[in-house]
Image (cartoon, rainbow, N blue to C red):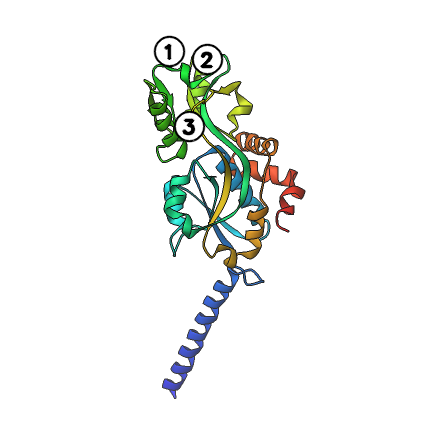
Amino acid sequence: MKMKIKKIIGGLLALSLVLSLSSCVNSKKKTNGESEKITILYPNWAEGIAFTNLAKVALESDGYEMDLISLEPGLIYGELSKDNSKGDVFMDAWLPNTHKFYWKDYGDKLVKLGESFSDGTTGLVVPSYVTINSIEELNKNKDKFGGRIIGIGSGAGIYANTDKAIEAYKLNFEQIASSGPAMVASLEKAVKNKKWVVITGWKPHYMWGKFDIKYLEDPKDVYPKDACTIISRRGFEKDHPKAAVFFKNFKLNEDQLYSLMDMIEQKGEEAGAKEWYETNKGLVDGWKK
């Protein structure tokens, strides 16, 4: 009799454990069967941070569990191309030109969902008080610039294009690898002291609203135009159909994006994105339909 009671108790405990685990699993599902968790991969670029955090707060308002992971762009493309990818979406793929090498390597395993910003440009940027207007004039003023072009991470497409520009224009300059924030800090320091500086710049970026700066003319067309493209791993749309609609519709114009970036700079990444979302709820929630 004691043995039977022990077996019954053991069976009840096992059943309780199964039900508990089942409850935990089910709690991670939306009522329509769509998985709650979405992971966005992003590089440490101002516009990518803005896109990513806005998507995070907007989708969290619908009950999604959002995870953000910052990586170099090459690692993002590689991770999303894996069959067992830990990521789902990348909102700042510069296509078809700046990231064309990444797309050549991984594009057949990725999906284009939409465009977060359609008018992306890159190039060499100087303060407006600098009296030259073309990349072709850099060598004659090498000493004023210290022979340096302040770049970002070596894995970025603009870094590779700047190496091409150095070769195409036969520049006697060295490109210095840093990061987006470090590059902006170099610009800010130079502007404060009215010094000459040349950096690798792009639009969209909040620095265009913060500083009086200009692109140097690029007569050899080394620096292309692109769209900030939203890409995903294969199968994402099937796994997250409602979220996929949001990413397909997600798009900001220049004024909207700079407003978002400014809010993030003032309030911090998540807090700034949340405040901007609440102010522009009609726009952002419209992307979910």
Residue 18 vs residue 54, the one in the foreground: 54
Q: Which residue in the rendered view is the most extreme toward the bottom?
A: 1
Return the disc, 1 or 3, that comes first in the chain's sequence: 1
Q: Are marks 1 and 3 in contact (CB under 8 Å)?
A: no
Depicted 287 relative to depicted 139: above or below: below
Q: Position of residue 87 (x, y in %)?
A: 43, 50
Pointer 1: what residue?
Answer: 140
Question: In the picture, residue 103 is in which quadrant?
Answer: top left
For mark 3, what is the residue? Answer: 222
Residue 76 can be seen in this image: no
Cα gap from disc 2 to disc 1, whole angstroms: 10 Å
Question: CA gap, disc 1 to disc 3?
Answer: 20 Å
Residue named by callout 2: 132
Left or right of 82, for residue 34 = right
Tell me whether the residue at label 2 lies in contact with that at label 1, contact meaning CB atoms closer than 8 angstroms.
Answer: yes
Residue occupying the point 50% across, 42% down: 229
First of labels 2, 3 by sequence position: 2
**Secondary structure under the numbered disc 3 in the rendered image:** loop
Q: Is 251 left, or right, of 177 in this rendering?
A: right
Out of 134 and 92, give the one closest to the viewer.
134
Residue 278 in the image: above or below residue 266: below
Dot 2, how many residues are within 10 Å of its Cα: few (below 14), some (14-19), or many (20+)? Answer: some
